[in-house]
Amino acid sequence: MLKRKVRGKTNSFMRFMVSYLIILGLTISIGGLAYNEALKMAKEDAIQDGLSALKKSRDVLEARFVEVDNMIDQLAMNQEVINMLNIKNPMKTQDYYKLRSAFLKLPSYNIINSFIDDFYIFSKNTEALISSNAMSVRTQSFYKESLSYENMDYKEWKNEILGTYHYKDIWPAHSVIKGYNPKPELTYVQSIPMGEPYNYKGAIMVLIDENKVLEYLMTPDIANDGWACIVDSSDRIITSANMEVDDLNSIDMAFELSAGYKEEMVNGQDVVVLYAESFSRDWTYITVLPSGIFREQVSGVRGIFVISIMATLLIGLITAFILASRNSMPIKRLIKRLQNAVGNNSPTSNEYDFIEDTVLQLVRNNKDLREYLEKQVPFLRVSFFERLLRGGFSQLKDIEAASSYARIDIKGEYFIVLVMKLNSFAMENDMNNSNETNVKRVVAAKEVTERLPWQNYLHDVDQDKVAVLTALSHNDIEEFDDKIEDVLKPLVDELQQNYNIIVSFGIGNICTDLLGINKSFREAIKALDYYRYGGKVKRIAWFKDIALPGLGYHYPIETEMRLINLTETGEEEEALSLLNELLAKNFTRDNLSEQDMEDFIYEIRGTITKIKNEILTQQEQDAIGISGLMEKMNEYQSIEDISESIISIFKSLCAYVQQKKQSRRDDMLREIIEYIKVNYIDDGLCLASIASKFGLTEKYLSQFFKDRTGENLSTYVERLRMENAAEMLIESKLPIADIASHVGYNNNNTFYKAFRRIYGVSPSVYRQHKMENTISHD
């Protein structure tokens, strides 16, 4: 609980103000030193500082590239990668699974180094490739759709990657299009296996964000007036900032030392060239700054020293006030958001203590939530298997989501359910003892788990029943019947002899997907009940061996509920599949009496009535003619006519649900776009804030917006802001910094980069160009 109360506004502002005043005072004090000597010393120190910073940048970048080297070494020696390289035909099942296995086990490598945007592993002999988040057996299609280099077609790119052996090659920065947005990337290529230049089978390609490399080279001076680059021994520019190729050609590249500086005349300007050679690569790190930057640090005229001091003091106070106000604003916004997050709107006496306390509280809350969720996992597992066996799921995606929450991974091509029952007559003296019954159930379940050779999942259905869900592969199907008999027959005998536990097994039919597990479970129960109440004794009962004559129509409650759920959610394909299966099961049974047939049709009418009353108003029912279709069911004489009428009704219901869903999606899209247009000036507007506003997850909102508009939400927001910024540049005389603030940017650099990305020029150049065009037209 946060306890500190605060005076909120002045605290952070005064901290910044005092800091800037201290800096201002120091600056004025230093200005009193002897000008000539200070100029020489300050210039030399500034140059050495710049060189030291360059060396540090070099050392950090070298270390980051070593991390990339190590990661590539690990990938090259990874067995899954080796298996992938040996694939001959990725379209074959066995080779495809090798490729799939490599893909599933490799994504974690990309977190080793945040330097890396992504990595790709290519096979030379096939069209197979994998990356941290994608797998493809058609490299050319993947290159066109998901990854491409500007001004480089697929054949040229493939030849560069796989046409020759590469050993730790790093290509100069190139514009790479991933998805829809171009981005400058450095390309690191390593042929594999390593050390086999005449027998390599593939290559690893790593994309390194050029902007992350430049972050280590860029300083405020370079960003404003200088430029920086990394060149190799052939004077190729690996990466650069604020420079052109002609700038590099104007420098004398004959450096005498491994690190140092030289003063030159470049393009009519005195500059200081700082350089440092790489220890591990044939590279040179270069930064070029105007000489005036170093002289200005101590420039001044002694004759007007006092006037300069006063002017400096006045300007410094104004600047300190502006900077203190600007720099304290993010802290105030952060405090406001934290107060909203924790529900505490009272300010605190110390903003930094408030931030610390709030973050600690959020961390504790997150930890408590994780612990609580961890405790719920066993209950989620029980609930999941109960729903799965009882038919509580209507769609495969619901099963996948629920199994993920319960941390259950069920993999198989086929599934079958066995139900083990502890027979009561074998435990006449034990059934009164609940604990002993539980012990015997646990012992029997343990034996079953250890004996069955497949992937099995156990669930306690009742005190005396345990369901065993078995996942099978295609190869297991042919021998399953014999194998299960070979396992269960001796197991039944041993449980009775060793533990005095008499069990029976009911076995349902094999199903092809997880939705069929409920059916297999019910069949296993029926097999047990058939022999239990039929006066026969059989320890292993197969549902397929049971003859079920004269049981009337088939329409269990769980089937009806599933049909209702599928129809009310508009899942037409799955609803019609279930309906066709149900109709076929009843209308093709020779032993179904006329009365049973009428009862079945009556039940179907009842189901339709439940659905239409739940999802449709009377006006909507009349609009789509449901009542008329239901009346026509009584007019048909043939089974085909009745089936066609029933299917037509369910199609109409599903289509109407889908139409309503579509209408809601259109309305939500309009609301989202309108909200963005009204609030784009808010610098806090982002995917997370919009998702929170509309009660959606970020992932769903991002995919929804992209699917509906064909454009990323962040791209749309940026484009909207830039369009308004461009309009303001033309129609107003506001400073560019104010325009940036008016369109939702609190950082000028970010605004400049975004504007240049959209319009290809800086805002000032854009304004000047538009004004010149206007004047010329006048």
Image (cartoon, rainbow, N blue to C red):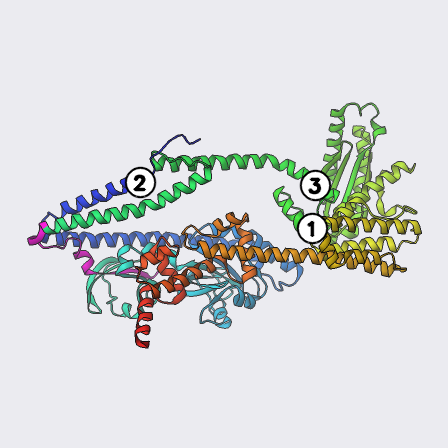
Quarter of the rendering containing residue 655: bottom right
Is 548 in front, or is 74? Answer: 548
Q: Is residue 444 left or right of residue 600?
A: left
Q: Is residue 731 left or right of residue 45?
A: right
Residue neighbourhood size for the residue with mark 2, other residues' Cα within 10 Å, grouped as few (<14), some (14–19), many (≥20): many
Q: Which residue is mark 1?
A: 395
Q: Is residue 295 left or right of residue 435?
A: left
Q: Which numbered mark, 1 or 2, is in the foreground of this view?
A: 2
Could you say where residue 733 lies in the image, as x and y percent from the top left?
Answer: 30, 62
User: Element under label 3?
Assistant: helix
Could you say where residue 514 lies in the image, as x and y percent from the top left?
Answer: 71, 49
Could you say where residue 520 lies in the image, as x and y percent from the top left?
Answer: 78, 46
- Asked if the residue under mark 3 is in contact with the one under mark 1, i.e. CB atoms within 8 Å, the reply is no
- Residue 171 is at least partly visible in this image: no
Decide: is 396 above or below 93.
above
Q: Which residue is mark 2?
A: 12
Q: Is residue 676 left or right of residue 292?
A: right
> Spatial distance from mark 3 to mark 2, Cα to Cα?
55 Å
Q: Which numbered mark, 1 or 3, is in the foreground of this view?
A: 1
Q: Amino acid at mark 2?
A: Ser
Q: Amino acid at mark 3?
A: Phe
Is 197 in front, or is 229? Answer: 229
Decide: is 361 above or below 89.
above
Question: Is 288 contained in the magenta span?
Answer: yes
Residue farthest to the front, as pictured: 619
In this picture, which residue range is highlighted in magenta?
281-306
Q: Quadrant of the C terminus?
A: bottom left
Could you say where residue 759 lies in the image, as x and y percent from the top left?
Answer: 39, 67
User: Element under label 1?
Assistant: loop
First of labels 1, 2 by sequence position: 2
Q: Which residue is mark 3?
A: 385
